[in-house]
Amino acid sequence: MAETADLPEREGVRAPGAPGIELTLTEAERGVLEDVTSRLARELPASAPYDLCREAPVTAHELPLRLRRALGELRQDGPAAYALVHGLAVDDEAVGTTPPSWGDGPARDRTRRQEIQAVLIGSLLGEVFGWRSQQDGAVVHDVLPMREYENTQINFASQEPIWWHTEDAFHPFRPDYVGLLCLRNPTGAATTVSCAADWDLGDPAFDVLFEPRFRQLPDHSHGVTGDGAERRPVLFGPRERPYACVDPYFLEPPGDDRLAGVLRRFYDTVEASLRQVALAPGDMLLVDNRSAVHGRRPFAARYDGKDRWLKRISVSRDLGRCWSAWSKDTRHVLVGDR
Ligand SMILES: [Fe+2]
């Protein structure tokens, strides 16, 4: 990312003090990751994805030290609100064509190594999980354009920007981190990230954002309605480096003009701090879903088998806290649609 280019390097990790950590795997580090991936691919049946979720936090101890240290820093609420890891192995030919829809069986088989790597790296931050209401409970999601969703606010859109948001903002068990591993991105469509540490919230008018006055309605991806959504703050935690939970597109507009005005100014502040990250094949971006928001710029999909294709994971710092939403078969799939 250009914004961090002038920062000093520490053992190849760009860094502390910056809102983002950037790390490029060396040849040797990539080799370690590849070896561990091969072992898991051999030992764990693809038909049992939740076994991978249970094994990955253990195997992740074998990942290269610099990677563990970088994500350890992100996990411990350091100054960084995202980590960008470069240099994962993605063989364009082996990955094959971008499928026309999520959950395509052969496409999933061709990208199993990347799915394992996404779960492994995500496991350095917590526990990877899926939702029963999304992509049939898969723990690794496909993010790709689908023609029928071109102009929507969900992951299969393309022409519409995805407005910046907290992932699953309406849900009490929303992920603490979101990971995006890039398989291909031919037009360089940018993911956007805005970090709370960059927001100038000095004006006392923003105090109201820390009060429980806002109703966050569900986005369209879980198939639920917002009946009974409680009023909550959109910011919480330390004032100088707050946590945020807001999806403006699905926030119920406040009835009162003053509140609406403050929200608009807050949105402008976040917007002004948006960084753009054009993920390249082999990049993985991990965003702290509490101290940063993310989105995506629009792009033109061609539906020619070469469109942008990412693998996405959700990570919870503590799935135990989510016990009331565990699905019958596994705690790694949460029931979000009730
Ligand atoms: Fe998102």
Image: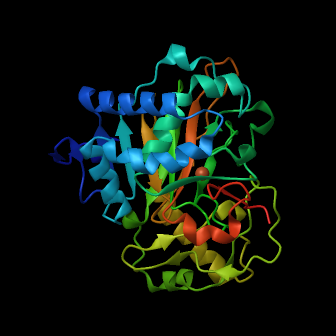
Identity of the residue drawn at 38% across and 28% down: 34
Q: Is residue 335 left or right of residue 175?
A: right
User: Which residue is nearer to you in this view: 106 or 168?
Assistant: 106
- Label total for image: 0
Instruction: Residue lying at the far top in this picture: please name it.
Output: 93
Image coordinates for residue 330, horizontal then vertical, percent: 66, 55
Identity of the residue drawn at 69% across and 82% down: 231
Classify 224 as above or below 6: below
Location of the C terminus by quadrant is bottom right
Image coordinates for residue 52, horizontal then vertical, percent: 54, 43
Q: Choose top left, top right, bottom left or bottom right for residue 203.
A: bottom left
Q: Is residue 156 left or right of residue 49?
A: right
Image coordinates for residue 146, horizontal then vertical, percent: 74, 32
Residue 40 visible in the current orientation:
yes
Residue 275 visible in the current orientation:
no
Q: Choose top left, top right, bottom left or bottom right for residue 238.
A: bottom left
User: Which residue is nearer to you in this view: 310 or 76?
Assistant: 76
Identity of the residue drawn at 63% across and 83% down: 258
Classify 284 as above or below 241: above
Instruction: Residue lying at the far front in this picture: please name it.
Output: 43
In this figure, which colouring scheme has been used for the structure? rainbow
Identity of the residue drawn at 81% across and 61% down: 224
Classify 244 as above or below 219: below
Location of the N terminus by quadrant is top left
User: Which residue is nearer to you in this view: 4 or 203?
Assistant: 4
Image coordinates for residue 171, horizontal then vertical, percent: 67, 67
